[in-house]
Amino acid sequence: MASGNELIASGDYIKHHLQNLTYGQNPDTGIWELAHTAQEAKDMGFMAVHLDTLGVSFILGSLFLLFFYRIGKKMTTDTPSGAQNFIESIIEFIDENVRGSFNGKNPMVAPLALTTFIWIVLMNTMDLVPVDWLPYLAQQVGVFFGADPHHVFFKVVPTTDPNATFGMSIGIFILILYYSIKEKGAGGFAGELLFHPFGKMMLPFNLFLEGVNLIAKPVSLALRLFGNMYAGEMIFILIALLPFWIQWSLSLPWAIFHILIVLLQAFIFMTLVIVYMDMAHQKEEH
């Protein structure tokens, strides 16, 4: 059985790896600065930003756009490169899913599906980086600038931050509302909320059911992705607490299995985006 000090050390290790690098206004001093503790980050409130989540997301998104742009500029019909074949296979995969699930006419849906799929895959893949590498690097950078290494946090996987997953899902939700009103009209969209599925006599009940169904879309998108990736990261952190000779015997099989989770969660998110966009374009005949 572990001693009390070992349990405290393990608890601090887990908390440190699950804490974001938070920048916000200190409520005591009024100064905008980096949070030194989890409590400080909490006290900074809603306007605080997670620099690690934003930074990693931006870098991965930029790499995705740059890579696709460079390959797109070099595409040829003669002898395609391996990178071109790889990108074309991804695009064909996305196109098949869009054709199978989306019955409307909107040229934005396929690029939206492609962007969400690739971006989420890249963010999820950060979970396969050994849990101590990037946080240690961030600590060394902090020490270089005179910071206490114990107060330098760096959460590697953006999709384990609910702010990131809810940000994406709320963006999708705004598009759902926009195209629902655009395709059906304000009256048609309101009619679906008020009169579907039980008609005019059950208006309050209809509004409650359809309202819950509508709000559940972004919530389910965000929580499903966050929950699965957070659980996977937690397992990697717990494995890292074990003796070195046990770590590799457990982390390698879990990493191989986790590759499936990385891809599956991105695929589910993309598929639901396509389905929700299709629902937004469907028009009731009555």
Image: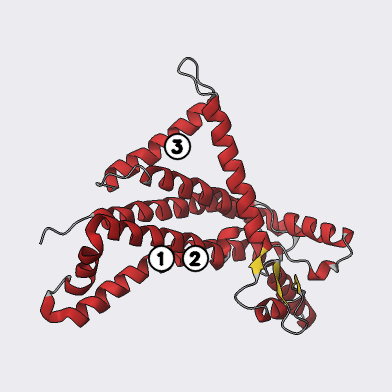
Q: Amino acid at mark 2?
A: Phe
Q: Is residue 76 above or below residue 116?
A: above
Q: Nearer the viewer, residue 174 or 248?
A: 174
- Residue under the point 77% across and 76% down: 31
Say few, some or many: other residues with alpha carbon within 10 Å of mark 2 (under 14 / 14 to 19 / 20 or more). Answer: many
Type of amino acid at the residue the image marks with label 1: Pro
CB-based contact (under 8 Å), mark 1 and mark 2 = yes
Mark nearest the camera among 3 and 1 is 1
Q: Tell us which disc is closer to us: 3 or 2.
A: 2
Image spot of residue 23 (x, y percent): 71, 69
From the viewer's perspective, is residue 282 above or below residue 79?
below
Q: Secondary structure at mark 1?
A: helix
Q: First in sequence, mark 3 or 2: give its number.
A: 3
Locate the C terminus and report the quarter of the image it occupies.
bottom left
Dot 3 and dot 2 residues touching (CB under 8 Å): no
Residue indicated by mark 2: 166
Q: Residues within 10 Å of mark 1 (few under 14, many from 20)?
A: many
Please state the horizontal and vertical placement of residue 253, each as a whole percent of the image: 58, 52
Give me the C-alpha separation between circle 3 and circle 1: 25 Å
* Quadrant (top left, top right, bottom left, bottom right) of the N terminus: bottom right
- Residue type at numbered disc 3: Ile
The colouring scheme, among rainbow, by chain, secondary structure or one colour, is secondary structure
x and y, in percent, of residue 76 in the image: 49, 19
- The residue under the point 31% across, 45% down is 106
Question: How far apart are the two marked residues, 3 and 2, measured between alpha carbons?
Answer: 25 Å
In this view of the protein, which residue sits in the foreground, 237 or 191?
A: 191
**Crowd class of label 3 (few under 14; some 14 to 19; many from 20; radius 10 Å):** some
- Give the residue drawn at x 28%, y 53%: 278
- The residue identified by callout 1 is 218
Q: Which residue is mark 3?
A: 90
Looking at this view, name the residue that lies furthest to the bottom. Answer: 28
